[in-house]
Structures are given as structure tokens and as C-alpha cells.
Image: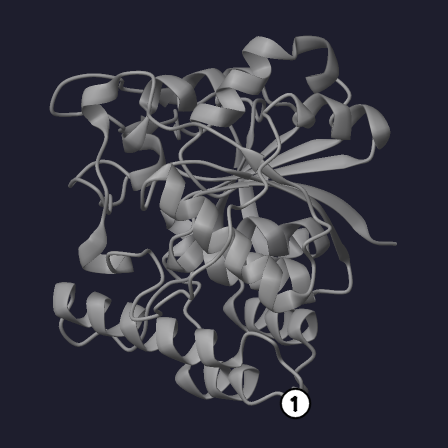
Amino acid sequence: MTKKVLMFCDPGIDDSLAIMYALSAPFIELIGLVVSYGNVSKKQAVTNAAYLLHLAGRTDIPLISGASMPIVEENLVYYPNIHGESGMGPIQLPAHDEIPVRPFATVPEIIARFQGEVIIVDTGRMTALAAAFVGFEKEMKDVHSFYVMGGAFFIPGNATPLAEANVYGDPHAAQLVISRATPLTLAPLNVTNQAVLPAIVVDKWAEQAENPFSHVIRAICSHYIEAHQQMMPGSLGAPIHDLVPLMLIRTPEMAGYIERPIEIITYGKEQGLTYVDFRPGMRNEGPRIAVTLDYPLFLRTFKEGVGLSS
């Protein structure tokens, strides 16, 4: 059976690749994209998402207005050094007519339409998802499950030495989401840092016959890998963080988990730091946190999702 996925995102290269995966994987029925600021401005993110839906011939999928800024506005940071000025590396998006974007109130309408079946996947800053919990409390109780990319547990962050970018970008929203979303599966940097697509897999994906994203895949992956190699000389590729929560929907055994209450620092030099009590003997309760990745299974699951032979 296909999984009905309402995706909150901020494309961004890895968000864009995750959207392409969601549009390709036979087990996912993408029922909406809630687009916010994050890797780029909200306006640019909407443009990028609309472009991907256009390439796929899926302009029937609702494009929904998300958040323009974090709860605390001074935390607003973009990453053009990683994602490019447009958020899609070197891709120059064609001129377009005004993009039809639906209001945020479309979120509870979708949840009500597919009552009990909607899986929410958030691959960006969590501001819009937090707003959904605040504004649509009743409807959010009918969401089947939540999968979120965010956090880093006792490993270095990627936005600061301590913090992962999605949580750092709006720690107040992340705190609200993690306290309200249930059941929640969190994919932190502990697993997503390992989610590297080898160049040969990227090439095969881009070379598929009738792949509407071919030119985009090759260009943005090359840009993304080069950006990561400049930051981390000697790295063999770039982690596609936002693929992981989507893939865990179908293949949860791809990761090893702990279940613990999560704490988030929302201010100061430690802003965005996520931590849990890992001491032996602590009860397994709270959000399900992926902490290890079965990399061969990750690759197999990805190839199956996009229709590549092993």
C-alpha cells in the first residue's frame, strides 16, 4: 500500500532530492508540499518546489504556503555556500507565471480528507509544523505519524559545533514539535551524515530513460558534493540528509533506535543543541530516535524507490 505523505520542506538541494524521491517512489503518494524559509527564503523555496512539480507533471499536488521566518526572527540564516543562491546549485530556473500557492489552512483540510492516513514528514525548519500544532490542534491528533529530520546527539552539528541546522534555525519550534508530535521518528545527523549517495548511483539515477529530473539531479549533486569537499577535504560525497525520514517510512529496519525524551537548548552559544539521557538503565520511552544506519540497506532502499536495479 502507498503511504500518504504531507511533506514540510525548504528546498534546498537535499530537500529537492527528497521531493524527487517522493515523486518517484511507488510506496509514496505525495499529497501536499508545505514550503517554508530555511535553506533559502520562502519565496525562493516555493519557486524551487513548483519547478520540481512542473518537471514531474504533478502540478495537481497542492503547494501550500508555510513559514517566512522563525519564531525568533534574529535566528534567520541561509546557506548559499552549500545550496547556491537559488537553493538548487547551478540550476537557473526558467521564468514562470505567478505560482498558485494554497493557504496554510489547506493543511487541516488534507488531514481531514485522509483521516488517520496522513504521514507528515518534515525535512526543514519546524516553524510551520509548530504552527500547525498551535492552530489545528484537533486535526493534528488525526495524523498517523510524524517523521522529522533534525538534531544531533553527542556528535558535531552542521550549523554550529553543537547544533544541526533545522533545529538551530528555529529551536523554539523544534521544541514544540518534539513535545507534541506522536508517534515521532527523528532522523538526526547521527544517521543522516551516513546517507551518502555514491557518484555511480547518482549517475545511474540521472541516466534513467524518461527521468524528468535528469539534468537537475546531476547538476545539483555535483554542486553539493563540491561544497562539502570544500568544507571537509577528502570527503567522498555529500550526505543527502532529507532522504532518510522518507525512506524510514517504508523500511524502518534501516536504522537502529533508542526512545528517550529529547531536550533542546533554545538560547545562547548552545542554541539548537539536542540531547537525551543515554545512561544505561534509562527507560525506553519518548520519541523514536534513529542512531545507527544500515548503509547497504539504505542504498538498496534508495535504488528500489527510484527504480534502479541492484
Q: Residue at x 72, y 55 (%)?
A: 250
- Rendered-image quadrant of the C terminus: bottom right
- Rendered-image quadrant of the N terminus: bottom right
Q: Secondary structure at mark 1?
A: loop
Q: Quadrant of residue 280?
A: top left
Q: Quadrant of residue 276?
A: top left
Q: Residue at x 54, y 53 (%)?
A: 50
Q: Residue at x 61, y 52 (%)?
A: 246
Most distant residue in the right direction: 1
Give percent across and percent down for residue 235: 23, 73
Question: Can residue 179 be spotted in the picture?
Answer: yes
293 relative position to 77: left or right: right
Give percent across and percent down for residue 258: 53, 37
| Residue for badge 1 | 209
Q: Nearer the viewer, residue 292 or 12?
A: 12
24 relative position to 227: left or right: right
Q: Is residue 152 above or below residue 302?
A: above
Q: Nearer the viewer, residue 30 or 93?
A: 93
Q: How many marks?
A: 1
Q: Is residue 262 above or below residue 207?
A: above
